[in-house]
Image (tube, coloured by chain):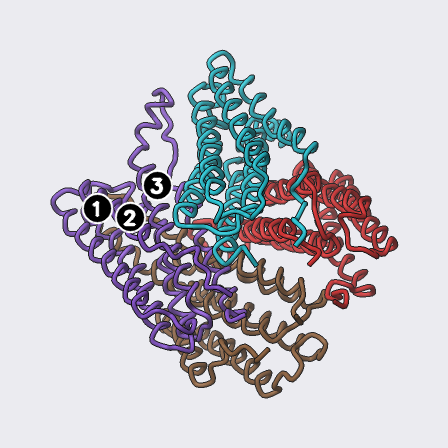
Chain colours: A red, B brown, C purple, D cyan
Amino acid sequence: MAAGLPIRRIEALTDGVFAIAMTLLVLGVELPRGADSLWSRLLVLWPKLACYVLSFVMLGVLWIGHHYQLHHIRRTDRALIWLNLAFLLVITFLPFSTGVMASERLDPAAVALYGGSIIAAGAALYAHWAYATARPALVNPGLDSKLVATLKLRIVAGIALSGVAIAVAYIDTRISLGLFLVLPVAYWWRSRADDLVGDDAPD
Amino acid sequence: MAAGLPIRRIEALTDGVFAIAMTLLVLGVELPRGADSLWSRLLVLWPKLACYVLSFVMLGVLWIGHHYQLHHIRRTDRALIWLNLAFLLVITFLPFSTGVMASERLDPAAVALYGGSIIAAGAALYAHWAYATARPALVNPGLDSKLVATLKLRIVAGIALSGVAIAVAYIDTRISLGLFLVLPVAYWWRSRADDLVGDDAPD
Amino acid sequence: MAAGLPIRRIEALTDGVFAIAMTLLVLGVELPRGADSLWSRLLVLWPKLACYVLSFVMLGVLWIGHHYQLHHIRRTDRALIWLNLAFLLVITFLPFSTGVMASERLDPAAVALYGGSIIAAGAALYAHWAYATARPALVNPGLDSKLVATLKLRIVAGIALSGVAIAVAYIDTRISLGLFLVLPVAYWWRSRADDLVGDDAPD
Amino acid sequence: MAAGLPIRRIEALTDGVFAIAMTLLVLGVELPRGADSLWSRLLVLWPKLACYVLSFVMLGVLWIGHHYQLHHIRRTDRALIWLNLAFLLVITFLPFSTGVMASERLDPAAVALYGGSIIAAGAALYAHWAYATARPALVNPGLDSKLVATLKLRIVAGIALSGVAIAVAYIDTRISLGLFLVLPVAYWWRSRADDLVGDDAPD
């Protein structure tokens, strides 16, 4: 049993934080009161609902990315635990930045705040991976260095795309939202080719 | 040990989301202020309390259904993880649609929104099961094809019943609520006959 | 490994619901605004803080009681899962009844609602234990019938005490609160004598 | 397998409470409405955001400390479970005291409340460790008595520092906030030297 107690509890804390963040997103969506029909009051909510779905999908991508890393990490040290906590700090911030973007979606500053928190999550994930894979004692023996590089590249690509989405917001924030949606789709597409999530090393 | 790391973490995220959704339902129930006696102020809440209990039971049915599926799935791929996340997305939406139905229970549109989210949960559960069972590498060897079909049929029956409940709402929304309550009772009744939940395959 | 997958997931859902209910209790405590000094504004909160601590301790007693039962149960069937869900339904209701008692603590009806939810939790816990222990296939072989009876008696005693606390509320609600506090202390006292929680059966 | 069922469930409850407390902290941060630009409205939030980050880091320190203790504890008794619940009670209180400090950060009383809750968490953690390590049956055989003393000393140092931070608040609350920030940094620094977190005892 290479992965000892610490990995298990980091997983538990991480899964808990993600589960709560995912479930809290919808709390930001509130039905407006009024004399209009229910459907028209629900229709007014569509930008908030879109932001909630987008952030849920974003959290899904980040959760899978994190879980993928832990799959190859077999022990932790204190620095790695704190890198993980830094990642979780950003995750707990996402419901806030999602709420801001949902209520001010035409303001480029709101998109910048949202994109900035996605970039921060990516940066924490990158630091977590780079730190662990630079220390052979922390990862599974025989970890493919090509895989290490591929995962790094993917995170960098996601960060770059978020940066572009922020820049574009100053032209039209709707293009930014579209670009954010490209991110999970692109990850999905790429990873279909080299799907390794379910590949437990033969034990 | 067939079920590797991924299954365990999907379970953890799923159990977390369900635990939070179940606990958040009651947050929608708030005691009205006023000069009336406490009992009469609580009595006013009964429709909200009924919706909370209904949704809790609904979440229980969906949780058991999901857990039942994972019991027979031994590995995942990325598509299955995303089908699972789609299911969880609908679960996180349920506290919202429950809240809408609780406050607008005489409006057929509110019942349609609620029934629609139950149908969406059923559809995600169906897709999850159909996808996994179509790939022998993902399920336990020797999975009974009759069981596969039975589970599919049960989900389809639940979806059909929810559809009827929505249609009936345009006559009287109270009949719809009654039909939604039939759903868990029917599942309970049927599954008493062929109870397999606790039947771990002999290992 | 007697305890199979189902027990583990029931534990996960239960621990999640308890963790959330315990953490939500404090959300009902809000600092009043005003020109008074912070200490005096905090002092005004003491009944709410007392209710929060009381309910936290109550949840602790119920969580230990539940965990104690599962320690002796090795498999579940669908009825037992639903008894467990009924127990969790009551647990998710506790933050609501705590909030009502915190804001209307001089009203016997609020104490009755709170005591009623404690009694309901006890009744669900009793039904869970009685159902499981009446079926030898569900519990660990060699489960002591004296232990079965002792746990039943303890739950009945707790229910009786809560009933007394409700009755007494119509004289003075403060005596009721004192009686509720006796409950965890009494459990603690009794169970010191025959402490079995940490006693894993020799494996 | 020395650590039996109880440890696992205590971990699950603890990880759940921490995950929720960490995620709830941000709920206290709300964007003010107004005609100002979004950046200036976000800028106004910096003290709230600073308190949220500080408390998140504090929770991280406490979570690691708790996990570190459980790493060396192999069984529990009822008193230890209740010491753990007392610790969790304080953890669930932290979002409240963080919110009070965030909104009244110039008031020494708010700093005293916050520092007091950190001290209470430290005291519970100390009692938990002292109780367990005084009973050889509860800890791993061969637990180094120097390690026992080191952990005690660290907790005492954290409590002392929090006490100083409270005292200093009556001069200037900003110095207190700085001192609270020293706490995690100091823990980090010290524990780098004697890092044992990832050191599973050879099994």
Q: Indicate the chain on which mark 2 is placed.
A: C
Q: Which mark is residue C163?
A: none
* Kind of residue indicated by mark 1: Leu
* Kind of residue indicated by mark 3: Val
Q: Which mark is residue C179?
A: 1
Q: Report the residue that reaches farthest toward the left.
A: C171
Q: Is residue B177 above or below residue A124?
A: below
Q: Indicate the chain on which mark 3 is placed.
A: C
Q: Indicate the chain on which mark 1 is placed.
A: C
Query: Residue A46 in the image: x percent, y percent?
Result: 58, 54
**Alpha-carbon distance for marks 3 and 1?**
14 Å
Residue at 50%, 36% (x, y): give it: D28
The answer to which image quadrant residue A192 occupies is bottom right
Q: What element carries label 2?
A: helix
- The reply to whether label 2 and label 3 mark residues of one chain is yes
Query: Residue D153 in the image: x percent, y percent?
Result: 54, 28
Q: Residue C53 carries which label?
A: 3
| Visible residue check, residue B149 | yes
Residue at 77%, 51% (x, y): give it: A139
Report the mark closest to the observer, 2 or 1. Answer: 2
- The reply to whether label 3 and label 1 mark residues of one chain is yes
Q: In this view, does D172 lie above or below D71?
A: above
Which residue in the structure is indicated by mark 2? C189
| Visible residue check, residue B55 | no
* Kind of residue indicated by mark 2: Trp
Query: Residue C173 in the image: x percent, y percent?
Result: 18, 43
Query: Mark 3 and mark 2 in contact (Cβ < 8 Å)?
Result: no
Query: Residue B197 in the image: x percent, y percent?
Result: 50, 76
**Alpha-carbon distance for marks 2 and 3?**
19 Å
Q: Nearer the viewer, residue A67 or D4?
A: D4
Q: Is mark 1 on a helix, strand or loop?
A: helix
Which of pointers 2 and 3 lies earlier in the amino acid sequence?
A: 3
